[in-house]
Image: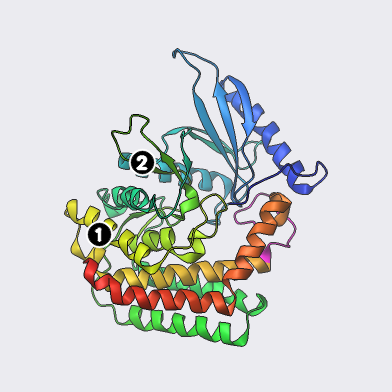
Amino acid sequence: MAAATPASQDTPACAHLASLRNGLEVALDHAGIATSAIRPLPDSGLAHAHFRLELLPARHDEAQEWIARLPKQSQMRLSATENLAYQAACFERCQPSHHTPRLEGALAPQPALPRGGLLVEAIAGRAARLPEDLRAITEALASIHSLPLPAVHKRAPLSAPDCPWQSMLDEIEHQCRYLESAGLTQEGHRLIESELQALRVFIAAQQAPAVISLISFDAHPGNFLIEEDRSGSAPPRAVLVDLEKCRYGLPGFDLAHATLYTSTTWDVASHAILTPEQVADAYRHWCQQMMATSAAPALHDSQTLLQARRAMWLWSLSWCAKWLSLNCETRDNGHHGEDWSSELSEDQLIAHVRERASHYLTEHCIRGVIDEWQQLARALPRTT
């Protein structure tokens, strides 16, 4: 997300991150995991702090490297224990795709580390470069989306709503309650309501059950690292490294999140403004990958993909309004569920998120995304 710089030593965020580091050392010691170094990574996300662990050689000739993912909060509004189990399930379910890090272990919530943490494989990759890495990203998503669905009774703890369209609409409408306090112009608010009403009409007309798959629900380009084959004999591999919100739902949500303006301009390292044709090409490539796996044709129906794109954008916009309304609250020292307090993250990160969220809610930006959607509506019928 934001390119981080060292925080002032007396800020709440710095104290919180230092506390997480100390708690991590205690938890690793209790787990019998020996390290030669623990290195904090830049504070680049609102939900986790990350530390690179250099493990002392054990049965290996060389030291291994893991990433410790320490939750700052639960975006799923779960308790610490439930949140950790949910995130572990995300990594375990996505692992057969070969486009996500391997789960190495977990550190249970404990006094020194109240929300616990996950230990995952360290991926040696670079930030995504758009549009050149879009095909690798859509291939990674298609690999996840084409995984076999478990039986209904085996989908927990991941969210698996009976009607993913209605569930998404409910989430959007819940977040839209914050639009009034987000500083939108009257016209900007009208445009969002018009798009939301179009989505309501589409969902109300659905009669057949939605065809679903395992999805990330957080597939913006900043969450990918790109592994390049040094020999040049294999294409780059995109690895989705941030897994905490997976669910069984509509893959069009992921495809949208990977290509929307509100996603491709979110992260400093992967920032890019895509043309409608570049977006359409990404959709075409994803469809080709899905058809190669004999996935159900309904998964890549152009109308379904377009409406999923509209829904993901409205979810993102309403989340921006929600964050702008809640980030000034005092942090939850009880470590219960969701917590968007700015006290948990460094000032530069908060300033970046505030600028991006405010920008996406401007009338100019809203009109730009609507115009792109209309251009895609003309182009996408050729992709299926």
| Residue at the spot of label 1 | 287
Is residue 319 depicted above or below 9 in this figure? below
Q: Which residues fall within the magenta stretch?
A: 326-339
Residue count near mark 2 (Cα–Cα under 10 Å), binned few <14, some 14–19, many ≥20: many
| Residue type pointed to by label 1 | Cys
**Residue 332 part of the magenta segment:** yes
The secondary structure making up most of the magenta span is loop
User: Can residue 117 be seen in the rendering of this structure?
Assistant: yes
Is residue 259 depicted above or below 88 in this figure? below
Is residue 282 depicted above or below 49 in this figure? below
Image point (29%, 47%), residue name: 143
Image point (37%, 53%), residue name: 134
| Residue at the spot of label 2 | 237
Q: Quadrant of residue 207?
A: bottom left
Image point (33%, 59%), residue name: 282
| Residue type pointed to by label 2 | Arg
Residue 60, disc = none
Relative to 348, 101 lies left or right: left
Image point (54%, 86%), residue name: 190
Of marks 2 and 1, which one's residue comes earlier in the chain? 2
Is residue 178 depicted above or below 96 in this figure? below
**Residue 211 part of the magenta segment:** no
Q: Position of residue 316 (x, y in %)?
A: 51, 66
